Image: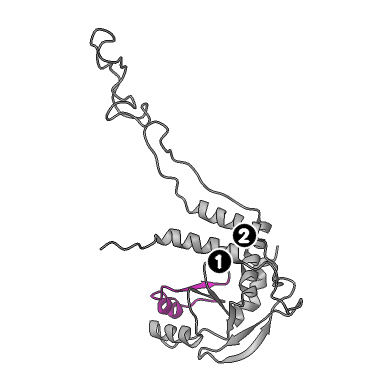
Amino acid sequence: MKTNKENPRKAKARKIKASIETAKTARPKGKAEGEFSIPVYDTKGKEVERLALDKGLFNGEVNKAVLYQAVVMYNSNQRHGNASTKTRGDVSGGGKKPFRQKGTGRARAGSTRSPLWRHGGSIFGPHTRDFHRELPKKVKKLAFLSSINSKLNDEKVIGISAMEIAEAKTKQFKAIVDALKLKGKSLFVLDAVDDKVKIASRNLQEVSVKNYRDFNTIDVLKCDNMIVSKAALKKLPERFKS
């Protein structure tokens, strides 16, 4: 029985597009400037404090146009551009005229590698090309900041005091996810990713663990929840320094 399972790449692209379209471009009602703060939990799911964010950066402003440009750049840079076909000049052989010009009753032909013939070349087929795109550094930083602000506006960002597990076991990491009551895809941003955390999280399809230096706009847009360690949150403003 055939199942209508959607292509994972198309599903991811659709989710990112939806994230941009539904992103709130301003802070939630009732929140004045400088009031953004996130709850910080321990690994047991207990709230231990609320942490105020840098109001100069995390002010809830979202630039959808810049987000769109960043997504287009990312998707273009994922393309290899390896598709290639041979024209009649690239196909081996065909140098000899297959039959005389007149008197055979057939259409005239000068080469067996004509696109009209079997084993001939291709007309207007794809050729290798470079799809690479680039954005100015300031635009990329603005897109990155806008993606984080969109999650703050949706109240999808929380803090964690420290990500510590005794053993590199999936069930221990899963226990933390369950304690935080996370649903959907979750992005954990840490100041340092040790081997225990990396091994314990890699079998969880809905979880992605990144160093605060390494995650980007796409990582933020495609996640449902963003969990930032307290240490990473203090270092995050470094990403926006010129």
Q: Residue at x 39, y 85 (%)?
A: 171
Q: Residue furthest right?
A: 33
Mark 1 vs mark 2: which is more N-terminal? 2
Residue tagged 1: 221
Q: Check disc 1 and report its element: helix, strand or loop.
A: helix
Kind of residue at badge 1:
Leu
Q: Position of residue 53 (x, y in %)?
A: 69, 78
Q: Residues within 10 Å of mark 2 (few under 14, many from 20)?
A: many
Residue 216 drawn in magenta: no
Q: Disc 1 vs disc 2: Cβ atoms closer than 8 Å?
A: yes
Residue situated in front as seen by the camera: 195 or 116: 116
Q: Residue at x 63, y 69 (%)?
A: 150
Q: Residue at x 65, y 66 (%)?
A: 145
Q: Position of residue 229 (x, y in %)?
A: 57, 80
Q: Which residues are magenta?
A: 191-212
Q: Residue 67: which disc?
A: 2
